[in-house]
Image: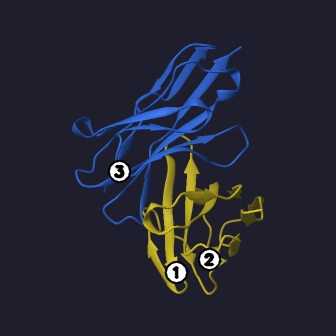
Amino acid sequence: AQSVSQHNHHVILSEAASLELGCNYSYGGTVNLFWYVQYPGQHLQLLLKYFSGDPLVKGIKGFEAEFIKSKFSFNLRKPSVQWSDTAEYFCAVNAGNFNKFYFGSGTKLNVKP
Amino acid sequence: EAQVTQNPRYLITVTGKKLTVTCSQNMNHEYMSWYRQDPGLGLRQIYYSMNVEVTDKGDVPEGYKVSRKEKRNFPLILESPSPNQTSLYFCASRGQGLIGTQYFGPGTRLTVL
């Protein structure tokens, strides 16, 4: 089975700090990659996705992610976080059978005002 | 408004009492899927459906059933719930074939006593 690893389980930052959340996956073939965000009490929303082309993907709310195939990684970044970015972030992979999705265990981000 | 709806949103039940969680989407999506979310484990896929009458197992299908008799609906059935099925459940749908974005419902919090 495929696996998705998010190494940071809980991150605490002050406003304006830079953010990088790690995501590694285990599949060696073609992959589709996603980052989702879940604000407290809400459902998951797509931040950004990578299917092909430019490995640097820009998403909503100033987030971006870089696909590094050689490292099986898809790290999420934001240059300057805001208090409203407090949420849980999930990396997900769609691989092989593109009908199956594999999610990481999530990273809880707390941004202090 | 394009959306995925789930009912009920909250449910407390007892071991062995059959229950159904409904999921409906109004986007004419062919693909639908069910996930459970547990602390520290992220989301795990239970079942998915590529189209009407076409379903397949995800990573954690034991104890669950699904059906897809109509394109818009994809109910999740627990015929004999057990306490280890206490979880937060999300339904999702995807359009545009294999590269479409998944849209998630608001979640159903299930407690099995």
Q: Residue furthest front?
A: A54
- Tell me, what hue is chain A? blue
Residue B113 visible, this orientation: no
Of residues B24 and B67, which is closer to you in this image?
Answer: B24
* Residue A98 horizontal side relative to residue A62, left or right: left
Sequence-wise, which precedes: disc 2 or disc 1? 1
Residue shown at the point (51%, 67%) measured from the top left:
B96
**Which corner quadrant of the image does residue A65 belong to?**
top left
Where residue A51 sits: x, y (%)? 39, 52
| Whether marks 3 and 1 lie on the same chain | no
Whether pointer 3 and pointer 2 mark residues with C-beta atoms closer than 8 Å, the reply is no
Mark 1: secondary structure: strand
Whether pointer 3 and pointer 1 mark residues with C-beta atoms closer than 8 Å, the reply is no
Of residues B23 and B109, which is closer to you in this image?
Answer: B23
> Mark 2 sits on what residue?
B79
Which chain does the residue under circle 3 lie in?
A
Whether pointer 2 and pointer 1 mark residues with C-beta atoms closer than 8 Å, the reply is no
* Residue A22 horizontal side relative to residue B104, left or right: left
How far is mark 2 from mark 1, CA to CA?
Answer: 23 Å
Which disc, if any, is residue A52? 3
> Mark 1 sits on what residue?
B51
Residue B62's place in the image compared with B67, above or below, is above
Where residue A93 sits: x, y (%)? 40, 51
Which chain does the residue under circle 1 lie in?
B
Identify residue type, mark 3. Ser
Identify residue type, mark 2. Glu
Closer to viewer: mark 2 or mark 1: 1
Neighbours of disc 3 within 10 Å: few (<14), some (14-19), many (20+): few
- Tell me, what hue is chain B? yellow
Closer to viewer: mark 3 or mark 1: 3
